[in-house]
Every structure is written in structure tokens, then in C-alpha cells.
Amino acid sequence: MESRYPIPPFTIATAIQKVQLAEDAWNSCDPVRVSLAYTVDTEWRNRSQFINGRDEVIAFLTKKWEEELNYKLKKELWAFTENRIAVRFEYECQRKNGEWFRAYGNENWEFDDNGLMKRRFACINDLTIKEEDRRL
């Protein structure tokens, strides 16, 4: 049985730890590493795209990081309950044409009893920025 600590029910300390672990994994830009935090049958909504299962997560993230260069993400705990966490985030990256952008949003996460994320719902807005306006 796979487990990914910390596991629910979350406390303020373990919720903050879970968010930091997610931030660290995503900043690695390693699709396989990131996928291991999710159940094999995970369900995602990312903008208007629906992604189901680890294989689709890996394919989605592989394509994402091929197109979004110099990726840097910051996540912040917004709220939590026993097995759910809400975060706000922003990330900056560069498109292949050299254009920089920042994405802002919120994610709602639901975890199974083993600490694997079974649902991830993301609302994301993009903003083109100048390189000198980067914050991350």
C-alpha cells in the first residue's frame, strides 16, 4: 500500500508541510516525481482540461514543462480540513518565444487515507509580464 506522508487528518503543521512538499516537487519539473504524490486514479481539472490517472498526469506535466521554461512556483496554504487542503499559488515561466508570464490561482486538494491526492481542482489565470517584473 502506497503512502505519502503526512497523512490525514491534517493539522496546521502537517498541512503546511504537505503544501511545501508539493511546491518542492513541482519546482523539480520532474513529471514522474510529481505524479507519485497522486493516486493511480487521480482526478484533475486544470483550467478547462480534465486529467485522469497518473499516466495522464505524467503526459500533461511533460508537455507543460517542455513549453514552460524556467518554471518557478510558490504555493501558500489557504485552508484545510481533515483530508482537504486549499492553496493559493503563483508561478512564473518563459514560453519558447521568450515571452514571460505569471499564472495565479487556487487549488483544492482531496487526499485518501494514505496521504495520496485523489482530486485536484485548479483555477488559473495567466498574465504576460516583462522579464524585469519577475518576482520569483
Image (cartoon, rainbow, N blue to C red):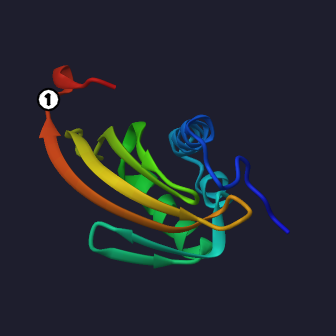
Whether residue 59 is situated above or below residue 106 in the rendered picture = below
Would you say 84 lies left or right of 88 here? right
Depth order, front residue of 77/92: 77
Residue drawn at point x = 41 percent, y = 59 percent: 108
Residue 106 image position (x, y, % from top left): 31, 52
| Location of the N terminus (image quadrant) | bottom right
Vertical order, 15 against 133 (above or below): below
Mark 1 crowdedness (10 Å alpha carbons): few <14, some 14-19, many ≥20: few
Kind of residue at disc 1: Lys
* Residue 33 in the image: above or below residue 58: above
The spot of residue 125 in percent (x, y) is: 19, 53
What is the secondary structure assignment of the residue under circle 1? Answer: loop
- Name the residue at 61% across, 74% down: 55
On the rendered structure, is 24 left or right of 122? right
**Circle 1 residue:** 130
* Along the viewing direction, whichever of 48 and 30 lies nearer the viewer: 48
Q: Compared with residue 49, is residue 124 higher up or lower down, i.e. above or below?
A: above
Q: Is residue 7 left or right of residue 24?
A: right
Quadrant containing the C terminus is top left
**Taking 6 as reference, is 29 left or right?**
left
Residue 83 in which image quadrant: bottom right
Q: Nearer the viewer, residue 47 or 59?
A: 47
Q: Position of residue 53 (x, y in %)?
A: 58, 77
Q: Residue at x 30, y 47 (%)?
A: 96
